[in-house]
Image (cartoon, grey):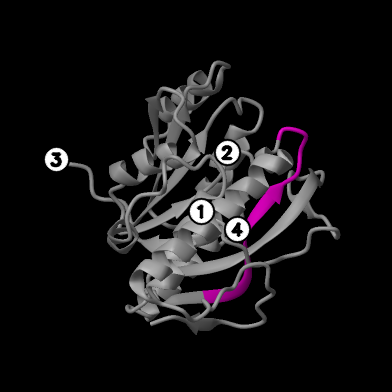
Amino acid sequence: MPAPFPQASVVIPVHNREQLVVDAISSVRQTTVDVEIIVVDDGSDDHTARIVGDMALRDPSVRLLRQPRSGPAAARNAGVASARGEFLSFADSDDLCAPGKLERQICKLEDHPELVAVVGAVAGFKSLDGQGNPLCDPEHPRRHNAALQAATFRTERFRGYGELAREMRFAEDVDYFLRLLEADAPLLLEPEIACMYRFHEHNMTRRLDERNQGYVRAYARSLARRRQAGRSGPLRSFFNQVIQRDMIIGG
């Protein structure tokens, strides 16, 4: 008898995160949602694949996909292509999914069938308390950013806006959200924290030159698309804002 389709799929791209990936997967597991966790190993040369593979043997909700080193966008694309859930979310291998995120965001998507996604806030942390819970860093309070890991999408709607740009090693999530904003896709912005971003010495975002070049490239791509479409007005963006209550933009 075939296994039932999960309600949600969570895609986790990973490269050399043997020390942190278990925490990321465990944070997604803390849910009442019927979820499949698709971990895409992007050419790791440490013990990441073995650790995740062992977890998958013990827990059928965890699936491991492996590919040669191709970058985070390609890894996320592979996970999305494999996803079977009606709803789609993401997690980064060094971050934590906030408790209740999936239940809450799926409920809002079900209440508003016109929505493409629900987007929550991101808050930063550097350490954990004695129970393993992240301690919010006052230097990095909650903000709404173009972070895929803070959102839950309808899977087919996500696919309908195209793949993430494989050629972008940084800011592919900014590029994707800009495409949604250009299309006036209806998004619900919620004030709750959906993702806890872990600050550590190996954050990709510490590579400031590459990060900033990625942002510039994402905005340049958006401007080119808008010029080609004859759209001259500014986009309504939620990037780096604080949202105080549920609000719908687009549509």
Residue found at the far right of this picture: 138
At horizontal 66% and vertical 27% (from top left) the residue drawn is 19
> Which residue is under mark 2?
93
> Which residue is under mark 3?
1
Where is 204 relative to 121, above or below?
above
> Which residue is under mark 1?
173
**Quarter in which the N terminus is drawn:** top left
> In terms of image quadrants, where is residue 15?
top right
Report the Cα–Cα distance between label 4 and label 1. Answer: 22 Å
Numbered disc in front, either 4 or 1: 1
> Which residue is under mark 4?
99
Look at the magenta stretch and give its main secondary structure. strand
Report the Cα–Cα distance between label 2 and label 3. Answer: 33 Å
Q: Are marks 4 and 1 in contact (CB under 8 Å)?
A: no
* Magenta stretch: includes residue 8: no
Dot 1 or dot 3: first in sequence order is: 3
Dot 4 or dot 1: first in sequence order is: 4
Where is 156 relative to 182, above or below?
above
Image spot of residue 49 (x, y percent): 49, 22
At horizontal 50% and vertical 49% (from top left) the residue drawn is 172
> In terms of image quadrants, where is residue 131?
top right
